[in-house]
Image (spheres, helix red, strand yellow):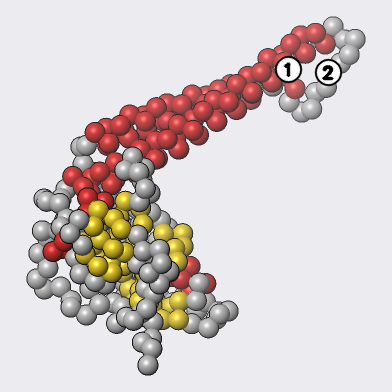
Amino acid sequence: MTAEATYQAAFTPADREVTVIRDIPAGISGPFGEYPADDLDAAERALWEAGYAVASEWGKETVNGDRWCKLTRIPPGTPYPAPAAEEAPADTAEQEQPKATGPTRVDTPEQREADRLTKIADDLEAAAERMSQQASGMYGRFQGGQPLLVGHHSYRSAVRDRDRADNATRRAIEAGKTAERARHKARQAQALADLAAIEALRTREWQRSDFQAGDIVRVRDFRLDTAVTGRYRVKRANVKTLTLDGGGGGMDDPRREYARVLSRTRDGVTVTDPTRPLSGLRRKSFGG
């Protein structure tokens, strides 16, 4: 008899996404869908629209910011339940919960480079905004739809003012595009710095004995100078690499060196440092 698939979800505030993990003990298993979500409410709605309902409380935030829960499948098109009415808290200060935060900030070369690029982007955005405001002010004489009066003594000066304002507007637009490119570059650098922080806080490198079949790992994919990562279920721990479930029944299972591992999730608990104690953790997996 074929084992029934079970599902769990991981919400990652830093990536603003929720990932569905499908687990079939005797078959294909691994990541089964990623959906954008800014918070837990958005994550639950995105999961519902994808055909999953949250079937447990969200777990506590892990070291790298993930929160996990169990899922159950629901029929397509099921209406999303209306939120229940909530009583006003007696003491708002006592009811407030800390917001989810991203990776811990660490003074690394990558973080310093991200800070440098962020400062450049901030300055360029501020300059572009000033240029835009200045260009808008140069159209003052044309407010209210004042036309160019051909043959009037003001015609030549009006044309000059219009041309100056148009040129200033074009320069402001180009400055805005330059600022956008700088901001994109700064965000990429910060994503790299976040990964470098995870690696810098490890007390030792990952090794074969740290993994077992069924673990969920987040790893660096492709080049190490990019922030592209992936989540996979471990199929086998080898001497130098992990064999991961690529979702193709073994036809395209990737291998990743231990140096590329960023975190490991087992029994719903995610760790980014292999020496973190495991005593007291739940032994029952969210997957069943």
2 and 1 marks in contact (CB < 8 Å) = yes
User: Camera-side residue: 2 or 49?
Assistant: 2
- Tell me the residue at 43%/69% (across/down): 248
Residue type at tag 1: Arg
Along the viewing direction, whichever of 82 and 182 lies nearer the viewer:
182
Instruction: Name the residue that disc number 1 marks.
Output: 162
Q: Where is residue 280 in the image (x, y as percent from the top left)?
A: 11, 73
Residue 118 in sight here:
yes
Q: With 98 as the anchor, is 283 left or right in this view? A: left
Q: What element carries label 1?
A: helix
Q: Tag 2: residue type?
A: Leu
- N-terminal of the pair, mark 2 or mark 1, is 2
* Residue on which disc 2 sits: 148
Question: Is residue 262 in view from this perspective?
Answer: no
Q: How many labels does the image show?
A: 2
Seen as rendered, the residue at the extreme front is 251
Q: Residue at x 29, y 45 (%)?
A: 194
Image coordinates for residue 43, horizontal then vertical, percent: 43, 66
Q: Please tell me which residue is depicted at 69% across the width and 20% down the height of the picture.
A: 166
Q: Position of residue 16 (x, y in %)?
A: 40, 56
Quarter occupied by the N terminus? bottom left
Q: What is the crowding at mark 1: few (fewer than 14 residues within 10 Å), some, or many (at least 20)?
A: some
Quadrant of the rendering where the C terminus is positioned:
bottom left
CA gap between label 2 and label 1 equals 9 Å
Q: Which of 163 and 253 is in front in this view?
A: 253
Which numbered disc covers residue 24? none
Picture quadrant where residue 60 is located: bottom left
In the picture, residue 274 is in which quadrant? bottom left
Other-residue count near label 2 (Cα within 10 Å), few / some / many at <14 / 14–19 / ≥20? some
Residue under the point 45% across and 38% down: 184
